[in-house]
Amino acid sequence: MKFEKEDVLLNVNVNNKESLLEELSKYAQKIGFTKDPEGLLGSFKKREEEYSTGLQDGFAIPHAKSEAVEKVGIIYARLEKPIEWKTYDNKPVTDVFALMVPPKNAGNTHLKMLANLSTALLEDDFKKDLKSLNDPEEIANYISKKIGANEL
């Protein structure tokens, strides 16, 4: 799996989690991760109903294992303004990693993506450095290197 500048969205202007998940689902269609944005959106929502994917320090990792997903992918979105999300520190979310996995890749790939990303998000330097970058290509390269995207 490659993580490229097309997988980075900056200054996303949404008012709530639902709007963000809609935007991410539409964008996933635009860049070829899905042909069924409504199905993908449904998968994101279903996962959020089971358990919030909000973490802490402004980060969330919504994810979808779904027939609606064509190929494994991650979209990183930085929001223009914080939105409410149930998180461990009860703070709003500003940075989101949307993970998408088709059922055929659900086992190892999905778990490895989550593990690598979760590990990176435990590092204060990763979060600080990521938030300091403003160029989509630099952000994509940084995330790729940190989560080992080329090995997934």
Image: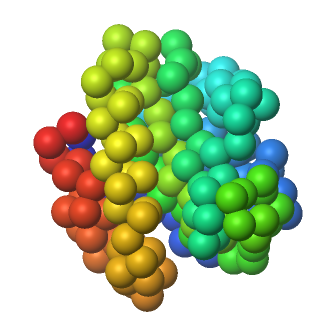
Name the colouring of the figure: rainbow
With respect to residue 82, does 60 lie above or below? above
Q: Position of residue 10 (x, y in %)?
A: 55, 71
User: Residue at image x 78%, y 53%?
Assistant: 86
Q: Quadrant of residue 31?
A: top left
With respect to residue 102, does 134 lie above or below? below
Identify which residue, 11 or 61, lies in the foreground.
61
Q: Position of residue 15 (x, y in %)?
A: 85, 63
Q: Quadrant of the N terminus?
A: top left
In the displayed structure, does residue 112 sit left or right of residue 57?
A: left
With respect to residue 106, does 152 lie above or below? below
With respect to residue 72, does 23 lie above or below? below
Residue 27 in sight from this viewpoint: no
User: Residue at image x 75%, y 76%?
Assistant: 81
Q: Position of residue 138 (x, y in %)?
A: 29, 76
Q: Quadrant of the C terminus?
A: top left
Residue 20 in sight from this viewpoint: yes
